[in-house]
Image (tube, rainbow, N blue to C red):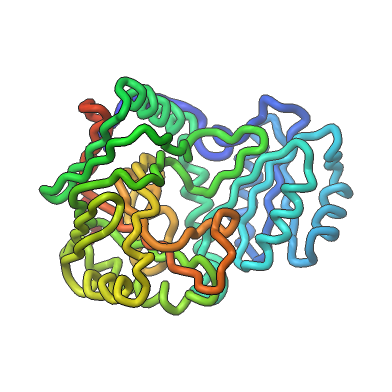
Amino acid sequence: MTTTGMGDHMNGYLGLLNVQVQPHWTVFLLDFDLPTQDIIRLTNQVKAGQTTPLVVRINGGFESALKTMRSAGVNEQSGYVSLHAIISNYDSSRTVKKLYNFLPRRDLARLVLPFRGYGFRAEFGSYLTRVVSEADYEQQQQIADRFFQLLGRNLPYNVRIESGGETLTIQDHDAWFDLAGPLHEKRIRMLPAGEVAYTGDRINGAFVADGSLLATPEDITVVAEAQQLSAFSAELPNQPLRLEITAGKVTKVTGGSAAVAVQQLFSKDPRYRTVTEIGIAFNGACRHFVYDWPAASNEGRPGVHVGIGGDPDRREARKRSDPLVHLDFIAGNCEAFVNGAPFLRVSYKPIT
């Protein structure tokens, strides 16, 4: 990966946590048996900073989790609590939300794991917590700051993405979202993180996904559909998928069997034609694409992804009876230019 704004910083949770606010607690919320060696690794890393680590099982619900926290010495009135959800059930997200809403001084980071019913295994938590532990969140913030500095040089701005010999442009005034860097009070972050994202519709051109495909169900009722789509991810390095986009709508898709499956989605529900996100990622700890399970680190790997379909973040997903699958089409070889200035260049060679 080539970008600007890189330096040497504390990796992992030491760079992620908002320890400037004291007294500070880092509370890991679990609903499954994360291997002991992973818990030791996480708590040891956190202990090196100005925070007190605590591991809390939340299977018993909100009241039980809060009682455990208070018994360990957490005082929600005087202390700052950083919640870190490592969960495997949709229902657990309700407990996490209640805890977040109850605490007056807090932030929240949720590790994005495929929930039970979507092939969950505890080892997925091991893999992604290692990614977070190796990530440089201060470096991410520098890179994001550089992006917004370039973006502000001209309005309407022009962001150009080159992939597979094709060009995709975004020309707009609308703001991009900063999904990188350290946590701040009342901030909610999905991990591993490390990107900037656009959700408007001023998107035109073509995009080639030659990295992977990440399918995330918006609701448990569409898990089977997400599993079917995930099976096509491994073919993209050899059979890239090409999207033609006009005014934020996918007008044509070509490629291998993945393209056929996506075209079937379009025929089934035209909402899938709407581009819901353009993300430029730069999390250097997301080194390789994972093809045997839907790893959120694929989206964080340095590169560009185009998202369609539903919103995988249930906090933002609209309540409806017909949920969708969120699909990220990820380019492993691409360049990004912001108002004409080079911002990111990445290449990827699959491990054989």
In the rendered image, residue 232, in percent from the top left (x then y), is placed at 29, 71
- Residue 145 in the image: x percent, y percent? 42, 26
Residue lying at the far top in this picture: please name it. 153
Q: Which residue is drawn at 23% across and 68% down?
A: 235
Classify residue 96 by image quadrant.
bottom right
Relative to 323, residue 287 above or below: above
* Quadrant placement of the N terminus: top left
Which of these two is toward me, 173 or 95? 173
Query: Can residue 64 be seen in the rendering of this structure?
Result: yes
Q: Can residue 303 be seen in this view?
A: no
Against 165, residue 78 (above or below) is above
Q: Where is residue 279 in the image (x, y as percent from the top left)?
A: 36, 45
From the viewer's side, name the closer residue of 191 and 222: 222
Residue 275, by quadrant, is bottom left
Where in the figure is residue 225, as x and y percent of width and height? 41, 76
Please state if 170 lies on the left or on the right of 130 as rendered.
Answer: left
**Frontmost residue, 159 versus 228:** 159
Taking the image as shown, residue 11 lies to the left or right of residue 163, namely right
Image quarter where the C terminus lies is: bottom left
Q: Is residue 287 left or right of residue 44?
A: left
Residue at the (55%, 60%) spot, across then down: 318
Q: Residue at x 60, y 55 (%)?
A: 315
Q: How many marks?
A: 0
Residue placed at 53% from the left, 56% from the top? 313
